[in-house]
């Protein structure tokens, strides 16, 4: 079936559909990972985004229920050069196309993804619409014109849990054995769109984890009498999550705090800094980040369209701990006054594969 991807500036790409049929708007971005498409599809940080994969072949190892990062497919659409019709893995339960179809999510293949990615790099990430309906370009343009920009949008409320819960799933090691490490610390994790592997790693590092909604108040969090507070990843504009910023502000100095991705940006704002939207964001599993304390270079997984403003942190009692070597943007901060630190990238995604796991031990040390 013919499918169209129309960008908000009128640029159009045509291809073939796979997965579900229909029509969907979203912010068109790209990811440079060579694998991990199911984790990407189910990552809440990709809410309302149409993901373009730079690696040409996707779907070759199928999909497996053990590889999800949330309880649903979160992306608005999936753009690939070629969707593999054959799956070659003993773990595969569904093809990529059937998986997307079951989730009601559209995919498009057969277009020039190199051209699309180069265009986004030059012009910047922008809204687009995927369609198999046969509507005219003018009709699609009119629908796209009504779709809001990602800037200013609070999407954390959409992907956050609706009520508190305790994470109880056991840790599964590389050979499939389950284990439940002794819990030495109690952690409250604020769910702005949390990935499940973050929860698994907190448990594997000796934490019992109470997950609370994005709108949880400081009083509600302190009622659990935790040893530490974790601020999760999530989608949208961090400056729009005003309630989260205020909650973190009121907890500074009362609890050790560790943030990842959106949690890092919220900590930045709570400490008096600012954030801004990047031209096309950082998304992929091969981004070099320098640890300014050790001078080690970490190969990191990233997924963010907003960034901490380095100049806004001057004079705020904040130490810059990590820097992105591609564009010299902030990748990590630490408060000089409070027991609080955060990173922009995703240590739980294991791209190194273990380059950044020390951060969870740093959190343990802070709580102890």
Image (cartoon, grey):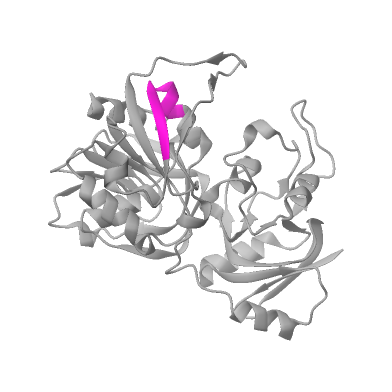
Query: Residue placed at 77% from the left, 48% from the top?
Result: 102
Which range is magenta?
A: 201-211
Q: Is residue 25 left or right of residue 288?
A: right
Q: Is residue 361 left or right of residue 109?
A: left
* Residue 307 sits above or below residue 164 on the image: below
Residue toward you, 158 or 172: 158
Residue 205 in magenta?
Answer: yes
Q: Is residue 33 left or right of residue 355?
A: right
Name the image quarter holding residue 4: bottom right
Query: Residue placed at 41% from the left, 52% from the top?
Result: 326
* Residue 363 sits above or below residue 252 on the image: above
Image quadrant containing the C terminus: top left
Q: Is residue 219 left or right of residue 138?
A: left
Residue toward you, 140 or 351: 140
Residue toward you, 362 or 167: 167
x and y percentages locating residue 331 in the rendered image: 34, 48
x and y percentages locating residue 304 in the rendered image: 46, 54
Residue toward you, 73 or 359: 73
Q: Is residue 353 visible?
A: no
Residue 313 in magenta?
Answer: no
Image quadrant containing the N terminus: bottom right
Check the image and name the residue furthest to the bottom.
138
Name the image quarter holding residue 222: top left
Query: Residue placed at 60% from the left, 41% from the top?
Result: 39
* Residue 26 sits above or below residue 307 on the image: below
x and y percentages locating residue 343 in the rendered image: 34, 44
x and y percentages locating residue 263 in the rendered image: 36, 48
Q: Is residue 340 visible?
A: yes
């Amino acid at each position: 079936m013919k499918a169209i991807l129309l960008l908000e500036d009128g640029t159009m790409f045509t291809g073939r559909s796979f997965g579900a049929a229909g029509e969907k708007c979203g912010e068109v971005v790209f990811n440079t990972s060579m694998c991990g498409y199911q984790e990407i599809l189910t990552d809440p940080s990709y809410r309302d985004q149409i993901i373009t994969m730079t690696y040409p072949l996707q779907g070759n190892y199928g999909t497996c229920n053990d590889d999800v990062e949330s309880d649903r497919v979160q992306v608005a659409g999936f753009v690939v050069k070629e969707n593999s019709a054959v799956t070659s893995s003993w773990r595969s339960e569904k093809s990529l196309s059937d998986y997307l179809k079951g989730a009601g999510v559209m995919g498009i293949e057969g277009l020039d993804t190199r051209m699309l990615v180069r265009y986004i790099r030059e012009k910047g990430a922008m809204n687009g619409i995927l369609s198999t309906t046969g509507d005219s370009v003018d009709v699609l343009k009119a629908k796209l014109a009504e779709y809001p920009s990602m800037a200013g949008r609070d999407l954390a409320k959409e992907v956050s849990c609706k009520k508190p819960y305790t994470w109880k799933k056991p840790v599964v090691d590389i050979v499939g054995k389950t284990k439940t490490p002794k819990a030495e610390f109690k952690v409250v994790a604020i769910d702005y769109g949390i990935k499940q592997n973050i929860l698994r790693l907190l448990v594997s590092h000796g934490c019992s984890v109470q997950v609370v909604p994005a709108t949880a108040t400081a009083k509600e969090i302190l009622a659990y009498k935790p040893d530490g507070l974790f601020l999760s990843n999530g989608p949208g504009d961090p400056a729009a999550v005003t309630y989260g910023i205020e909650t973190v502000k009121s907890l500074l100095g009362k609890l050790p705090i560790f943030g990842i991705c959106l949690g890092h940006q919220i900590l930045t704002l709570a400490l008096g800094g600012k954030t801004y939207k990047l031209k096309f964001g950082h998304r992929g599993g091969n981004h070099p980040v320098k640890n300014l304390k050790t001078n080690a270079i970490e190969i990191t997984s990233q997924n963010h369209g907003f960034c901490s403003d380095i100049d806004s942190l001057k004079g705020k009692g904040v130490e810059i701990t990590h820097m992105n070597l591609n564009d010299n943007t902030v990748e990590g901060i630490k408060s000089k006054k409070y027991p609080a630190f955060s990173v922009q990238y995703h240590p739980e995604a294991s791209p190194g594969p273990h380059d950044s796991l020390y951060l969870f031990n740093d959190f343990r040390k802070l709580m102890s």
